[in-house]
Image: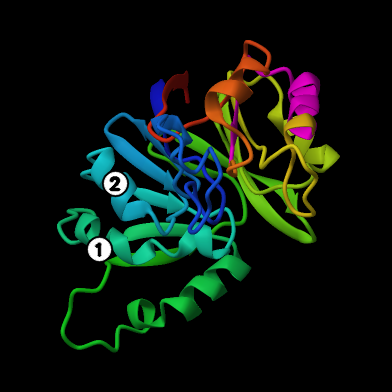
Amino acid sequence: MNATLTVLGSGTSMGVPTIGCTCAVCHSPDPRDRRTRPSVLVEYEGRSVLIDTTPDFREQAIRERIRRLDAVLYTHSHADHILGLDDLRPLSFHREEGRIPLYASEDVARTVRHMFSYIFEEAYKFGGLAKVELRNLDGPLELWGARFEPVKILHGDAAIYGFRFGSAAYLTDFSEIPEESMERLRDLDILFLDALRHKPHPTHSTVANSLRLVDQLQPRRAFFTHICHDLPHEATNASLPNHVKLAHDGLKLQFEI
């Protein structure tokens, strides 16, 4: 079935513009150089599945006119991927299907439950809490006719998840992809890869490393995300192969899920 992927955010943990920075990218007039924290929304058959709730989710949801949300998948528990959870509140209040399910691995769920204890302990007596529930993510999910498969990747020393769904895959925040995961990323139409910058980083992929992965995996289209202010959008795209581009906030792609 046909699906739409919307890039809600394509930036690194500090976002672009970065607070206090005077560099050219942070002051660029190109709207594609404005990068909120990394997340995507997958829509199909009237359903909406979100990957990560960034600190910028409110701004992203208003920009994209998000009016419903059916599930959230979490890649890992770093601040730039979970801190927007409370902004799910208005999308959760009037659901006919009950609480919004949040799918997370055991360690991610532990961190989320601790950081948002007021939501999950429900000790706040005046109401207004997000109506969500944590569910265990330990294997592929079948969500309304689509399969979402967690794919193990390494973020420095931490094992976290990317996701494959149909002919697309989304891998953010990685420094290495284990060989067994590489085999699950073949025959893709769309592949999203972390590509922080050119300079090596201990927990993130570089442009050169992600280009190497594209050559190995041979997706029809590849997009780089989790981008810092070292990479100007237009100039970087001009240096990439035709089927590889930097993602940008608001980018919409059609694919088969």
Q: Nearer the viewer, residue 104 or 224?
A: 224
Q: Residue furthest right?
A: 179
Q: Residue furthest top?
A: 242
**Residue visible at 58% across and 18% down?**
189
What is the C-alpha distance between the residues marked 2 and 1? Answer: 12 Å
Which residue does the numbered mark 2 point to in the structure image? 61
Q: Nearer the viewer, residue 234 or 93?
A: 234
Give the amino acid type for the residue marked by disc 2 in the picture. Answer: Ala
Q: Is residue 62 left or right of residue 135?
A: left
Span shown in magenta:
209-225
Q: Is 217 contained in the magenta span?
A: yes
Give the amino acid type for the residue marked by disc 1 in the picture. Answer: Arg
Which residue does the numbered mark 1 point to in the structure image? 89
Which quadrant would the N terminus be assigned to in this image?
Answer: top left
User: Above or below — where is 101 with respect to 121?
Assistant: above
User: Above or below — where is 87 with respect to 7?
Assistant: below
Element carrying mark 2: helix
Q: Is 142 contained in the magenta span?
A: no
Element carrying mark 1: helix
Q: Is residue 62 left or right of residue 235?
A: left
**Residue visible at 59% across and 62% down?**
105
| Nearer mark to the viewer, of 2 and 1 | 2
N-terminal label among 2 and 1:
2
Q: Nearer the viewer, residue 142 or 194?
A: 194
Q: Position of residue 225 (x, y in %)?
A: 58, 37
Q: How many marks?
A: 2
**Residue visible at 30% across and 54% down?**
58
User: Above or below — where is 145 with respect to 244?
Assistant: below
Give residue 252's mark.
Answer: none
Q: Is residue 122 left or right of residue 80?
A: left
